[in-house]
Image (cartoon, grey):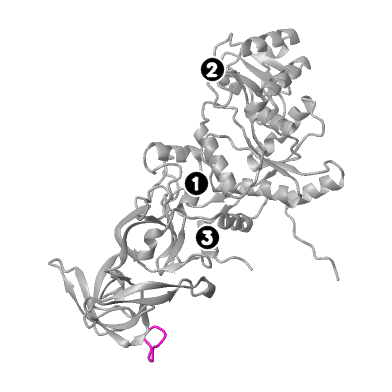
Amino acid sequence: MAEEMTAKNFIEREIDKDLAEGVYDHVHTRFPPEPNGYLHIGHAKAILTNYGLAQKYNGKFNLRFDDTNPMKEKTEFVQSIIADVKWLGADFEDRLYFASDYFDEMYEKAILLIKKGKAYVSDLSAEEITATRGDFVTPGKEDPGRNRTIEENLDLFQRMKNGEFEDGSKVLRARIDMAAGNINMRDPVVYRIARLTHHNTGDKWCIYPLYDFAHPIEDAIEGITHSCCTLEFEAHRPLYNWFVTECEYENPPRQIEFAKMYLTNVVTGKRYIKKLVEDGIVDGWDDPRLVTIAALRRRGYTPDSIKKFVELAGLSKADSSCDLDMLEYCIRDDLKLKAPRLMAVLHPVKLILDNYPEGQTEEVEIPLNLEVPEMGTRKVTFGRELYIEQEDFMEVPAHKYFRMFPGNEVRLMGAYYAKCTGCEKDADGNVTVIHAEYDPTQKSGQETRKVKGTIHWVSADDCLDATVRLYENLVDEEKGKLNADGTLNLNPNSRTILEHCKLESSLKDAKPFDSFQFVRNGFFNVDCRDSEDGRPVFNRIVGLKSSFKPQA
């Protein structure tokens, strides 16, 4: 029998080749976020990809913060990222690191480059460096400081470190090739002066390394074998390799790029999310309308659903977009066999069964999930006065409307048949009460005839009065994500707050992050921020209908 072959992605094929050729004898990956905001769904792909590779090859996985820019970094972001990575199940054990842990070694490597004639101190401003770098057809112009002596550069760099110069007055540049076809190789900046208090090192340093210099050194120090990153760093790979080579690291890491995760009709850019938070348009980085990992967790998405989404999206070298429907499919698929199915009336109107004995109630037993019999049943109070959805009654029915209207009989889910006899209205013509008569001979499980319509309900005497929040896309998908001026085209109906919804009374004991399917209304989750004991607030995770069909 032929050996079964397991399909591998292009990164796994490259790792297999490196292991077979003895380039490395193990696999060690990392996830290196900058602590300048909350992680989003695209970062989940990077986390799960790097962690998954380490797992598959029985290797190691590091979580390392690229905290080289204290201007934008906060301890809040560090803590949120740690929580997100743990929640996704990426186990970094005791391998939590910070780029700032290596500032001393980075400084020594910069000294090494100067001594080798591979770095020099420049007096040009950032604007002047950009202006003299050239373009794809024009070579750059040499920096006046490029031909300083090694001794002069060592002295100036030491004085930069000692704080003798103003911010922005000098930088350290790598001495590579101002005519290189890859503009990233045209003497990139290695260190800049910035008098900023760092969240980890305090005021120890007034010079900070730039990302392109710091990142390969961090990988090399930690013994990373495969530095997997997104496609925008492909053009930086020659520079990555130059730094680890010139800094004389043995058995240096290898950079491999993969395509980013793009998701339609959502906001993922940190700059946009930050503005939404600062302008009060959303109520924080974990607002359920966002797709930060914290927001997805708060809304009710599960780690398993996000893992499935990443798997379906796949790993490639070409940029592409995934539809939001695919993410929603994944959470539906995950919860449909896990979540109890309960009754909740979001737009209630009272239904009175006129022939049911006044003051009497009974308990009816209803399965928690018809698709999972082993989940068991629950008991629900049934009585003379109930709440049903407003849309489940029409005084003048539309074509093929099988729910409640005068003269029509429906099944009250898990209970009895009931025939509508009429309704009451207020002065404006709004229906306030529906009247019906129940048939005591037609109880659930004992029916002797059939009806076409089934509606859900809750007892007016035994229900939870709750707040429920419904969400739509934060940006208006009909008109596009951005306006002509570059601002976000926001959907004014992205959140609808419903007060005084009527839910099964057992839901008063629901805890934050508990998930349920509300019959005919979708999947819901108990909000972790705004809920109180006995007064849960519910967020709709996703509706029940899906337009996404997974490929066989």
Residue 103, above or below 45: above
3D distance between C-alphas at marks 1 and 3: 15 Å
Few, some or many C-alpha atoms within 10 Å of disc 2 (few <14, some 14-19, many ≥20)?
A: some
Give the label on residue 14, or none.
none
Q: Kindly state the secondary structure of the residue where label 1 is placed.
A: helix
**Residue at image location 55% in from the left, 34% down from the top:** 35
Residue 460, above or below 292: below
Q: Which contiguous range is marked in magenta?
A: 444-451
Disc nearer the start of the sequence (1/3): 1
Which residue occupies the foreground of this view, 333 or 374? 374
**Could you say where residue 396 lies in the image, as x and y percent from the top left?**
24, 78
3D distance between C-alphas at marks 2 and 3: 46 Å
Q: Quadrant of the C terminus?
A: bottom right
Disc nearer the start of the sequence (1/2): 2
Which residue is label 3 attached to? Answer: 331
**Residue at image location 30% in from the left, 67% down from the top:** 462
